[in-house]
Image: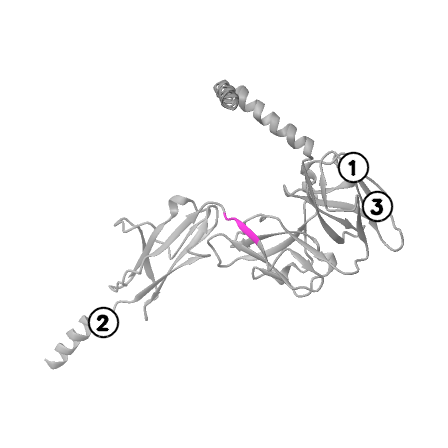
């Protein structure tokens, strides 16, 4: 009689197996990624479980697999998921798991920034930081330099030591002159691989006391007006003509003087016959092997005469569109003259 009572108490107090739900690669994913939900039950002595998945508190079973995979997740797959297990050849039932939330965003975007700054002196330390918007789990990063803005077949070049920045930070402990250039990054994760593609462009400009080549500007200043001639020469100790002038403009275009409409190059000298405001940017010398030296920031602004023409053109355009404004201006002018005469 006493043994029977003890048996009933033990049966009533047996705890249900605990359930743990996991999401790979992350609870926050992006449209198109492969996502796997997994249900693990901690039940000793049970060899086979029947799994039931539920979404957003619904009573209908969403899936009966231990691992449910979305091969290309969409926004409609977002929600709260929970799992419960039942012994296939027995009577044991697990607790229902805590719900895990899957969020699905639009395509991932990589953002590249620099610390502490993009203009450096030879020997400075600098870190390029690559981040994926709203996500930090499971990404592998790659680092590139921009080689051209027009030839997409050779647009980017993978850095030989790209693996050094696998954690999202690419650090140069002692910047050299040839670290000058325009950098990009991308991030990948999962199987099959999901790729964020390329980030924004981030330039680094490294200056030094004695570079192997100097960019000589004529007229010898960095601020210029429009509609004037400007020459830029790469000069080294051996008077080599194997340098080319490159530039990175404010509209993020990487261009060669030798293959452009804005200038012409003879030897190591680049000539801009008539400057424009779009010529504003950073100019430097590049060797035949692709090393960049002596970046110089050049600005081009409207000349005084062109500024006046621009103002008059804007005013005439406004008056043409709005004739009532023209009448108002004339009346105000007449009133002012009458007041002066009295």
Which residue corresponds to mark 3? 268
In this orientation, which residue lies closer to the viewer: 75 or 339? 339
Q: Mark 2 sits on what residue? A: 14
Label 1 crowd (10 A; few <14 / some 14-19 / many >=20): some
**Left or right of residue 329, residue 10 in this image:** left
- Tell me the quarter of the image containing the N terminus: bottom left
- Please name the residue that numbered disc 1 is placed on: 229
The residue lying furthest to the bottom in this view is 2
Depth-wise, is mark 3 or mark 2 nearer the camera?
3
Is residue 146 or residue 72 the one in the foreground? 146
Q: Kindly state the secondary structure of the residue where label 1 is placed.
A: loop
**Gap in angstroms between the C-alphas marked 3 and 2:** 85 Å
Image-quadrant location for residue 8: bottom left
Distance from Cα at disc 3 to Cα at disc 1: 17 Å
Mark 3 lies on a secondary structure that is loop
Identify the mark nearer the N-term, 3 or 1: 1
Residue 132 locus on image (x, y percent) = 51, 53
The segment highlighted magenta reads 108-112
Earlier residue among tags 2 and 1? 2
- Residue 72 at what x, y percent from top left? 46, 46
């Amino acid at each position: 009689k006493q043994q029977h009572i003890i048996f009933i108490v033990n049966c009533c107090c047996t705890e249900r197996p605990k359930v743990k739900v996991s999401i790979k690669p992350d609870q926050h994913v992006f449209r198109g990624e492969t996502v796997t939900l997994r249900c693990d039950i901690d039940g000793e002595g049970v060899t086979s479980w029947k799994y039931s998945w539920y979404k957003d508190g619904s009573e209908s079973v969403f899936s009966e697999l231990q691992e449910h995979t979305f091969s290309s997740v969409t926004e409609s797959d977002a929600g709260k998921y929970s799992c419960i297990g039942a012994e296939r050849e027995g009577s044991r039932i697990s607790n229902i798991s805590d719900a895990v939330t899957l969020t699905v965003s639009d395509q991932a975007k990589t953002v590249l920034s620099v610390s502490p700054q993009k203009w450096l002196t030879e020997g400075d330390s600098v870190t390029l930081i690559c981040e994926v918007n709203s996500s930090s789990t499971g990404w592998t990063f790659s680092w590139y330099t921009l080689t051209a803005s027009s030839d997409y077949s050779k647009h980017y070049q993978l850095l030989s030591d790209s693996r050094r920045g696998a954690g999202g930070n690419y650090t140069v402990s002692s910047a050299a002159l040839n670290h000058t250039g325009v950098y990009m990054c991308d991030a990948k994760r999962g199987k099959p691989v999901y790729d964020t593609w390329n980030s924004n462009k981030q330039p680094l400009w490294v200056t030094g006391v004695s570079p192997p080549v100097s960019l000589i500007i004529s007229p010898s200043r960095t601020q210029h007006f429009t509609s004037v001639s400007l020459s830029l020469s790469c000069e080294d100790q051996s008077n080599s003509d194997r340098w080319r002038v490159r530039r990175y403009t404010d509209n993020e275009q990487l261009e060669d003087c030798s293959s452009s409409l804005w200038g012409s190059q003879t030897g190591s000298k680049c000539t801009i016959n008539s400057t424009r405001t779009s010529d504003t940017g950073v100019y430097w010398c590049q060797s035949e092997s692709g090393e960049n030296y002596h970046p110089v920031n050049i600005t081009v602004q409207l000349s005084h005469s062109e500024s006046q023409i621009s103002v008059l053109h804007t005013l005439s355009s406004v008056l043409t569109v709005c004739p009532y404004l023209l009448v108002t201006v004339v009346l105000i002018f007449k009133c002012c003259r009458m007041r002066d005469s009295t």
